[in-house]
Structure formats: C-alpha cells, structure tokens
Image: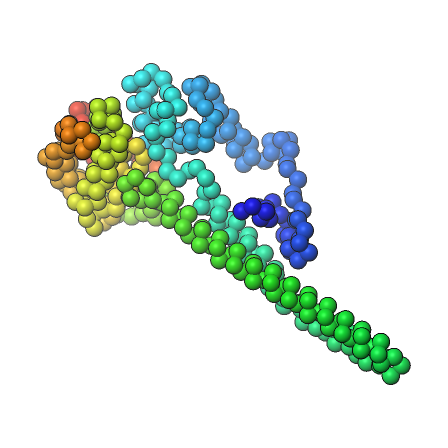
Amino acid sequence: MSGAIDLQHATRGSLLPAWLRGGRPETRPTPDRGTAASDPRQAARRQQFDDIGDFLFAHDLDLSAHNFRVAQEQLSGSPGINATIAQLLRDNGRLTDEMLARIDVGQGDGIRPEVLSDVAGALAGRLAEVLAVVGHSRDSARDYGDALDRQMQSAGEDPIGTLHRLMLLTRDVVEATRTMEEQLDDARRETDKLRAKVQSARRDAERDHLTGLPNRRWFDARLAMLAGGSAVIALCDIDDFKAVNDGHGHDAGDRVLTFVARLLKTELGGRAEVARYGGEEFVCLFEGSTPDEARDLLDDVRVRLAKRSLVNQDTGAPIPTLTFSAGLAPVGEDVRGSLRSADRALYEAKRLGKDRILIAD
C-alpha cells in the first residue's frame, strides 16, 4: 500500500497521534547484532539463515526467494523436499536454479498470510484506540461547556466579542469532530479491506494452485489436529515421474499431476483427505481407519491408475503407464515422527521395485 503507515514498526503510543495529526509514526530502532546474539531465539534464526546461505553457496544457486524457501524446507527436514533434492542429486550429480524452480514449496513467495493477519490485528488495535479517542470526546464536550459558561459570564461586558468567540469556539469543535469522524471511517474501511485480504490470502496459502488440492501448509495444520487419534497417514509418490517430464515436457507433467490428484480425491471419496505435499508427492489422511483398511483403499486406487491409458494431448504420443508407491503409518502423539515413519515406508516401497504400498513397521 503506497504511503501506508508501517504498522509492524510503529509504536502503540506514537501511531494514534500520527493518524490524528497526519504525520508519520515513530519507529523502533533496529536491534544491533549484539542484542540478537544474546537472545537464543535470535541466535537460532541467525544460524538458520547461515545454514541456508551455506546450502545455496555450496550448490552455486541464486539468492532468490524461491531458492531460499527450498533450502529452508530442505534444512527443516521436509520429507518431500528432501526426497526430491536427493533424487535430483542422484540423477544429475548437482543442483541448478532450473531444477529448484520446478520444486513446489507452496505459496511461500509474497506476503505470508500470518504476516497479513498480524497487520490486520495491529490495525484493529489502532482502530480501537481511535474509538477510545472518540469516547474521550466526552471530556472535550465538558471542556466546551466550561468554555461556554466562561464566555457567557462576560457576555454583559462585551456581547459582540463574546458572540464572536463563541462562534469561533463552536467552529473549532465542529471541525475537530468532523476530522475525527473521517479518520474513523477511513480506519474502518481500511480494516475491512485488510481483513478481506487476510481471509483471501489464507485460503490461497492453503491451496495448491495446480491441482486444486489443499497443500502442505494445510496438511501440517490438519495433521497436528489428529495427534493421538485414530488416523492413518499415507505418503504417495508417482513412480518415475521424471520420465514423464523428460519425455513429454513439463506441461504434460503438470496435467499428469492434476489427473492423479483428481483420481485420488475422487476414488477415496469421503474416506480420506487428500493434499499435494510437493512435487509429485501426495498425502492422504484416513481418519477413523486402521492401517490395513487404509492400505486396501489406497491399493484400489493404485490398481485403477495402472489401468488407465493416457496420451499427451499436445503430441498424441502415449504416456507410459502411471503407477505410484506409498508408505503408511498410524498417526501417534508425535505427528512428525508418524510422518517420518510413512516416509521410510515409502522409501522402502521404492527400493523394493515401486508400484506398491507398505505399512511402516
């Protein structure tokens, strides 16, 4: 927003007067590195930035926002990103900016929804302060009444001068009230707009734009809600997907991803929640199912997929038979541990020849 007040750096005490008088708010001084080093959280963040930088420089990658996100996900232990990076290194021996550009890390670029939410909250807080000022106008009204009393006491001595001063006093109060009302209306409109943007950004941030499925951000939040419950997680990875991209192009690869996404969602119906985890990897959450039940449901989809004959709509060339491998694990109290177990089962399914589903030991 051009010319907008920096809500994240404005102090609570300085922002409201700045709004009322049209000036700029004061800003907090930037903490020096010594202060950051004494704070464990700041030190951890600095170490994370250093590790990300080391990763990017080690592979001679551009310092782009997307590459930064990929490195961040890889260093945080994301199974999907780790598997993709490992496969790229096995196939090519190195990483390039073009390879990382094809890795889906969700809606990481641009304004993050949590940041928008913080701004909306801050703006709502400022609105509350403006409302408080309007409430305090009662004091102004009392002061105005006192001033009227004083002027009326001198009315007999200088009636013309008293009338003139009363008119000036009334005009000032009316103008101040009108200005305050306009500022309040502007604040309300700004808050409504920002809240709408937050809601839209949050929806977008939890949706994979290619397949229309929920994405990893949504999945992580949903998985945390199922901790310790009766649920099964399945990590599914399309076998030899690189061959589709290499042989038919990335547009055809995107259509294959969309097709598999739709098949998983349609065939599993209401028995599982399906999300795109990243790249050619999907995740299914079977709530209220046992691992064996989830395996049987997913295995039916695997068989149906292998029977489908697909053609590249751009060239008419047949696309090789599609299969996928999957690893399943029950969701325990440690949801990240459950995810790692499913990932290990997926890796084992790949190692044993692909096109199969294994339940974690």
Counting from the top left corner in percent of width and height, residue 215 is at: 33, 41
Its colouring scheme is rainbow
* Residue 263, placed above or below residue 99: below
Closer-to-camera residue (272/292): 272
* Residue 82, placed above or below residue 178: above
Q: Quadrant of residue 99?
A: top left
Q: Is residue 167 left or right of residue 189?
A: right
| Residue at point 34%, 44% (across, down) | 207
Residue located farthest toward the bottom when viewing the structure as drawn? 156
Q: In which quarter of the image is residue 142?
A: bottom right
| Residue at point 68%, 65% (across, down) | 176
Residue 182 in sight here: yes
Counting from the top left corner in percent of width and height, residue 256 is at: 22, 34
Residue 333 in sight here: no
Counting from the top left corner in percent of width and height, residue 131 is at: 60, 64
Q: In this view, does 57 lie to the left or right of 315?
A: right
Residue located farthest toward the right when viewing the structure as drawn? 157
| Residue at point 55%, 52% (across, down) | 122
Residue located farthest toward the top when viewing the structure as drawn? 93
Closer-to-camera residue (52/253): 253
* Residue 315, placed above or below residue 274: above
Q: In which quarter of the image is the C terminus?
A: top left
Q: Is residue 189 left or right of residue 142?
A: left
| Image mark count | 0
| Residue at point 37%, 20% (across, down) | 95
